[in-house]
Image (cartoon, rainbow, N blue to C red):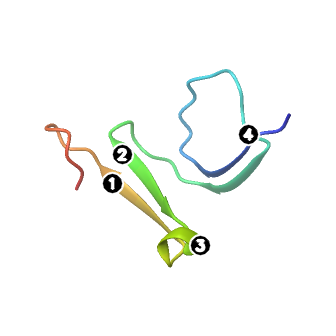
Amino acid sequence: IQLAILVDRGHRELPIRPEYVGKNVPTSRREKVKVNLVEEDGEDKVYIMEVLDNGSKS
């Protein structure tokens, strides 16, 4: 079994690493990554959003 991911944030919660990475995007733990795909969303795009203290995203 090999692991492939679109966006690698660098945070590891399990003792495994992906063999294939689309893009390395270092983020803080407060940031979330949203990926849009042209087949589903009409565009290929990656958003980095900071989670505010009240739980909403900016």
What kind of residue is marked 2? Answer: Glu
Residue 1 in the image, given as x and y percentages of width and height: 86, 34
Badge 3 local density, few (<14 within 10 Å), some, or many (20+)? few
Q: Position of residue 18 (x, y in %)?
A: 73, 39
What is the secondary structure assignment of the residue under circle 4?
Answer: loop
- Residue holding disc 3: 39
Q: Report crowding for label 2: few under 14, some 14 to 19, many 20 or more residues within 10 A (C-alpha).
A: some
Q: Residue 39, located in which quarter of the rendered image?
A: bottom right
Q: CA distance from mark 1 to mark 3?
A: 22 Å
Q: Secondary structure at mark 1?
A: strand
The earlier-in-sequence mark between 2 and 3 is 2
Residue 38 is situated, as x and y percent measured from the top left of the image, at 56, 75
Q: Is residue 43 above or below residue 5?
A: below
Residue that label 4 marks? 18
Q: CB of mark 2 within 8 Å of CB of mark 3?
A: no
Question: Which part of the image, by quadrant, shows the C terminus?
Answer: bottom left
Outermost residue to the top = 15
Q: Residue furthest left?
A: 54
Of residues 40 and 54, the one nearer the viewer is: 40
Residue type at mark 4: give it: Pro
Residue placed under numbered mark 1 in the picture: 49
Query: What residue is shown with label 2?
Result: 31
Indicate the amino acid at tag 1: Met
Q: Nearer the viewer, mark 3 or mark 4?
A: 3
Q: Position of residue 13 (x, y in %)?
A: 56, 24
**Vertically, is 42 above or below 11?**
below
Give the mark, 2 or 1, whose residue is nearer the N terminus: 2
N-terminal-most mark, 1 or 4: 4
Please rate how many residues cluster around mark 1, counting C-alpha atoms within 10 Å: few if below 14, some from 14 to 19, many from 20. Answer: some
